[in-house]
Image (tube, rainbow, N blue to C red):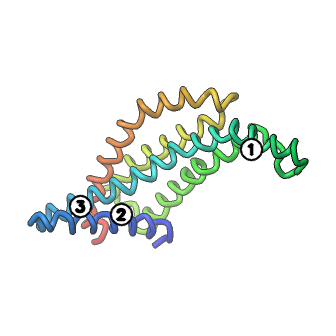
Amino acid sequence: MLPSLKAASSRAIIIAKTIFQAIRHLGLDDAQTLTLSLDIGIFANNALTAILILFSPIPILLAKPSSDKHLSKLYYERGIWHFKPIGWTTYRILSLILPSYALGLQFYLIGGALALHGLDVAALTFLAIETATVSFSCILALLPGLSRNPFQYLRKYARALKLAMPAILAWLLAAAILESHQLPLLAG
């Protein structure tokens, strides 16, 4: 198994085990409880990843005006060349790194899943939904860094996130439910 695929599976399993243990304290420990725990674990893992990707450009681009103010003060008062104000290009590139990496990693994981389980479309139907949703999230997160004025674009981006987030989470939930119900097929 690919290391990144193993890490993603491990995170989902840890969440699922924690939820299963919590539900067992309520007196439920049947197969449906296990499936529900897997649903929640897979969904939480994928949703957390998508949220990190989607919100990653915001603090990076918001840091530019603040850092310019404070770093330029150090530069002009102390003459320290390391603190010379940095242009927008650097912040744009920084805001593009995580979504670009996540998009590449998503296709790497798809390749790994296909290599591991073959082209058994019946067992991997969740993969199409998950791939489309994560890819959309990554592409959406790239937009602020690609805009001409990233700082002003953040307002539009926040509105786009507000509109897109419910759909993204719904599709990730659907993919998680399909994946947890197909785990027996994947294991076999």
Q: Secondary structure at mark 3?
A: helix
Residue shown at the point (43%, 62%) measured from the top left? 114
Residue shown at the point (32%, 50%) measured from the top left? 175
Q: Which badge, 1 or 3, comes first in the chain's sequence?
A: 3
Q: Secondary structure at mark 2?
A: helix
Residues at discs 2 and 3 in contact (Cβ within 8 Å): no
Q: Nearer the viewer, mark 1 or mark 2?
A: 1
Spot occupied by residue 72 in the image (x, y as percentages of width and height): 81, 41
Residue 166 seen in the current view: yes
Q: Nearer the viewer, mark 1 or mark 3?
A: 1
Is the residue 98 above or below the residue 6 in the image?
above
Q: Residues within 10 Å of mark 3 (few under 14, many from 20)?
A: many
The dot on residue 90 is 1
Residues at discs 1 and 2 in contact (Cβ within 8 Å): no
Real-space Cα separation, disc 1 to disc 3, in angstroms: 42 Å
- Please state which amino acid type lies under the numbered disc 2: Ala
Q: Secondary structure at mark 1?
A: helix
Q: Is residue 17 left or right of residue 52?
A: left
Is the residue 184 above or below the residue 65 in the image?
below
| Residue at numbered disc 3 | 37
Q: Is residue 114 left or right of residue 21?
A: right
The dot on residue 79 is none
Real-space Cα separation, disc 2 to disc 3, in angstroms: 10 Å
